[in-house]
Amino acid sequence: MARDLLGCLFVVAHADGRTVLRLVETEAYRGALDPGSHGYRGPRPRNLSMFGPPGRLYVYLSYGVHFCVNVVCGQEGVSEAVLLRAGEPVAGVEAMRVRRGVVEGNRLVASGPGRLTQALGITREHDGASLLRGGSMWCARDEATERFQEGGISQTKRIGLAVGRGDELTWRFVVAGHPCASRAR
């Protein structure tokens, strides 16, 4: 699913309009099979939405600083999700820049999971929100999605995990060479 989301549009409807990103970087997390996953040790109050149903968001606060958003994709009761790491601004760009405080260029508007959620206005209040029809958020394919996927996908080690916590797993997917993708430190 992490690979399939690349090139898709992630849309958030707000009272003042829509913000849209084209996803250019994702990471997969596999629950009980993955020591880097928040679901590795089973359900807890903080991670319940990660255990389904699929098609919902799992939003958490990272290091007490910024929110990160995952799309839940495992069957109900199984903790599997895809972290949305980076996106290319498509619509509502000025609103995203205001939220981010970025005034020039698009590269850093949603490059990295914390920047992405801030640009889209996603907070912990969105934890468990549905991406299914009729909601204020959804993910969609369009005519450009296939071009993004055919242009080349890089599969690399995930970013930001401690040694022995799944850092060696190559479950990060990036539209090859895309300027809006995050950079490994």
Image: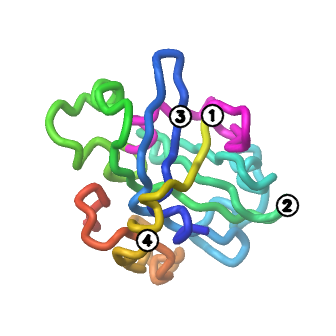
Q: Amino acid at mark 3?
A: Val
Q: How far apart in space, not on screen, are marks 1 and 4 (Cα)? A: 28 Å
**Residue 149 tag number:** 4
Task: Report the front residue among 111 and 61.
Answer: 111
Of the two numbered discs 4 and 2 on the same chain, state the one appearing first in sequence: 2
Above or below for 122 versus 48: above
Q: Position of residue 95 (x, y in %)?
A: 35, 25
Q: How far apart in space, not on screen, are marks 4 and 2 (Cα)? A: 30 Å
Q: Which residues are magenta?
A: 116-136
Helix, strand or loop for disc 1: helix
Q: How far apart in space, not on screen, are marks 3 and 2 (Cα)? A: 26 Å
Of the two numbered discs 3 and 2 on the same chain, state the one appearing first in sequence: 3
| Quadrant of the frame with the N terminus | bottom right
**Discs 3/2, front:** 3
Of the two numbered discs 1 and 3 on the same chain, state the one appearing first in sequence: 3
How crowded is the residue under tag 4: few (<14 C-alpha within 10 Å), some, or many (20+)?
some
Q: Amino acid at mark 1?
A: His
Task: Report the front residue among 18 and 115.
Answer: 18
Q: Is residue 159 visible?
A: no
How crowded is the residue under tag 3: few (<14 C-alpha within 10 Å), some, or many (20+)?
many
**Residue 12 tag number:** 3
Of the two numbered discs 3 and 4 on the same chain, state the one appearing first in sequence: 3
Q: Is residue 107 left or right of residue 151?
A: left
* The residue positioned farthest toward the top in the image shown: 15
**Residue 77 tag number:** 2
Residue, disc 1: 126
Residues at badges 3 and 4 in contact (C-beta under 8 Å)? no
